[in-house]
Amino acid sequence: MDVFEKLKILSAAAKYDVACTSSGVDKSSAGGSIGNAASCGICHSFSADGRCISLLKVLMSNACIYNCAYCLNKVTNDVPRATFTPRELAELTMNFYRRNYIEGLFLSSGIVKSPDYTCERMIETLKILRHEYGFNGYIHCKAIPGADSALLDVLGMLADRMSVNIELPTQKSLTMLAPNKSKEAILKPMGLISHKINENCTDLVKYKHAPKFAPAGQSTQIIVGATDDSDYTILNLSAALYKKYSLKRVFYSAYIPINSNPLLPALNTKPPLLREHRLYQADWLLRYYGFEANELLDEKNPNFNPLIDPKCNWAINHLDIFPVDVNTVSRELLLRVPGIGVRSANRIIQARRVGKLDFAGLKKIGVVLKRAQYFITCDGKIAEGLKITPDNALNALISDSGKKLIEDSSECRQLSFFDYISAPNKLLTV
């Protein structure tokens, strides 16, 4: 099998991993090296299912010894198998880079023989790129759960970002669908990476030229919809991972039915992309807006409303707090107003030092008044002609952000340059 045939098989096998983003690290090439990684991101393209990718995204091998029910590459699947040698993959990466096809590499792998053996092959590939070719571009590498900690140390010194996919949110789900994996085995390398990053930051304070360990941090991925785990369970797990392991990002991947199994959704089930979208919105609120997971959902309401985004839903349920006066309210509460983002909140704080703001001024600043007007006043005055009631606010917010999703529910999918044929999507029940 030639390299091109391997590339077709292994790039197709990698498309279900969505943790592929801009670099998050600012690093220019030094003398005698080639390539660079810019913090503003790198060239983007689109995979067949519409996901935005920016790197050569490929598996080292899809010859996996594990038997995860949801995975295309599980050992019992009758699919074409291929494995790159470290030399083949390094040369392929450099050839693509020199032709300006890519700016970096996203490398993952099925488990070949053992976690240690797989990790050793990935390390050899990265060593060829870094040391032999002097490649200084961005590399995102998947850490293999179960691999020796010494191997993960070496991998972290060669990669810009590392990630360990937790995949399913509970041990019960892992036991049911991924019997070869355990939550403990996944969290152990995650903790090791977090510890090494913190330790390395201390070294860099003391020694300017100390080698960097995964300077772009670590991330993980959670599959949404393969099991009956609620949004509440998933969001609480994400919040805990951010706090304990200082993750840069948790990615949510709508489950795409590819295997027939009574424990999994039927093959004609459409991926729950709207649910994935709501989780990303909620994740943003956790990281940048000061929300806690238990503020957005609880055991009585464990799933997000598909008709309205999480921030609007929270505001509707807390109308006793609103309306607030934009000229006097704290930044923390400003960030909780629908239609006001981090940037517009900062602009409001800056502008009101000079003078009082009115609704026209808010519009110029960038506030989305279609949503915000139901939750704010300007110098004690509401928007002209507006009658604020819970029903009015809810109907307006659904009209603004949810009605079109309902009208287009039969076609609710991510944008794609390719044909995408599947059964109509079913909206979540709440």
Image (cartoon, rainbow, N blue to C red):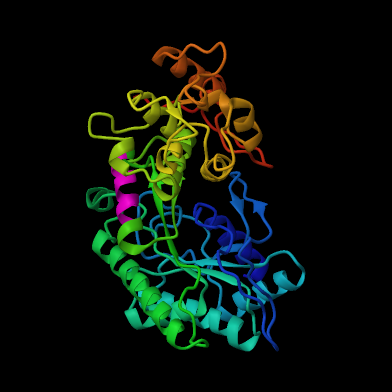
User: Which quadrant of the figure has residue 94?
Assistant: bottom right
Q: Is residue 252 magenta?
A: no
Q: Read off the magenta span.
A: 232-241
For the stretch drawn in magenta, what is the main secondary structure?
Answer: helix
Q: In the shown orientation, is residue 403 left or right of residue 224?
A: right
Q: Does the rendering let one see residue 401?
A: no
Residue at 28% from the left image edge and 40% from the top image edge:
294
Q: Residue at x 54, y 84 (%)?
A: 127
The answer to whether 269 appears left or right of 56 in the picture is left
- 243 lies above or below 133: above
Residue 100 at what x, y percent from top left? 75, 67
Q: In terms of depth relative to the viewer, which is nearer, 293 or 12?
A: 293
382 or 251, nearer to the observer: 382
Residue 332, horizontal then vertical, whole percent: 41, 42
At horizontal 30% and vertical 50% (from top left) the residue drawn is 237
Residue 217 vs residue 276, the one in the foreground: 217
Residue 372 on image: x %, y %: 51, 27
Q: Quadrant of the C terminus?
A: top left
Q: Nearer the viewer, residue 163 or 195?
A: 195
- Establish if 363 lies above or below 16: above
